[in-house]
Image (cartoon, rainbow, N blue to C red):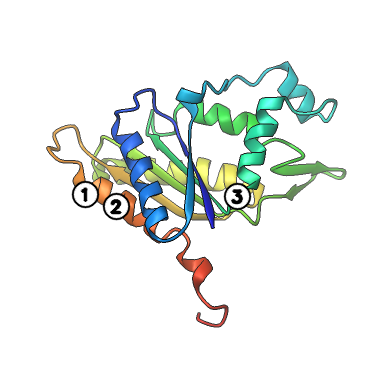
Amino acid sequence: MHALVVVSHPDSASLTHAAAARIAEGIARSGHTAEIADLTAEGFDPRFGAADQAAHLKQAAPPADVVAEQARIDRADALVLVYPVYWWSMPGLMKGWIDRVFANGWAYDEVPGGRTEKKLGRLPVHLVGLGGADRGTYVRHGYDVAMRTQIDHGIFGYCGAPVATSELLLVPPDAVDPAEALAAARALGGRLFEAARRPADAA
């Protein structure tokens, strides 16, 4: 099976990129394949422009770069998003990637009568956010719940894509060694396709 690992961080030497690499390593060790899509290095334009608006209204075909990203996702059996937590959400680059790529007519369909058809039910999604605050901060202020509401439910629930993993790997600024977070990332990659390997009657 094949996973698309999408990473957003401007520094290729960051912990975020290291976590994405460990996830891909875990996937490979379990006998599957992974492609890492580095949105910064690839120069993806996150700006939702007039061409995107026309595609949203179904007045024009989607822009070529959006079609290419949708094709990458269509080839994948799972989607993994790896990103640093910025202001208790994902970075603008990754959010813009979602804004443009998870488009009307592909990720969902707005049909007459005000109904929405969810179109990504076949795509398990794994969310991995890397944060610098401790877990108590997320719980105390409700940031963890807010992130799950807006990202897990608000984005992927709207498209019907099941969120199989929603993980915060937290490395406070005074932490000496991020090894635990990287080990967790590798373990996540190793078990990414475990459910798909189980026999149908092994519940």
Q: Amino acid at mark 1?
A: Glu
Q: CA distance from mark 2 to mark 1?
A: 6 Å
Q: Is residue 73 left or right of residue 90?
A: right
Q: Nearer the viewer, mark 1 or mark 3?
A: 1
User: Which quadrant of the figure has residue 10?
Assistant: top left
Q: Would you name the residue on which mark 3 appears?
A: 157
Q: Disc 2, disc 3: CB below 8 Å?
A: no
Lateral position of residue 72 relative to residue 11, left or right: right
3D distance between C-alphas at marks 2 and 3: 25 Å
Q: Position of residue 8 (x, y in %)?
A: 44, 30
Marks 2,1: beta carbons within 8 A: yes
Q: Residue at x 31, y 38 (%)?
A: 18
Q: Earlier in the sequence, mark 1 or mark 3?
A: 3
Q: In this figure, which residue is indicated by the disc labeled 1?
A: 180
Q: Amino acid at mark 3?
A: Gly
Task: Give whichever of 129, 34 is nearer the camera.
Answer: 34
Q: Identify whether 28 is placed above or below 64.
A: below
Residue 148 percent coordinates (x, y)? 46, 46
Identity, as a three-letter code, of the amino acid under mark 2: Ala
Q: Decide which of 148, 196 is in the foreground and name it.
A: 196
Residue 184 is labelled as 2
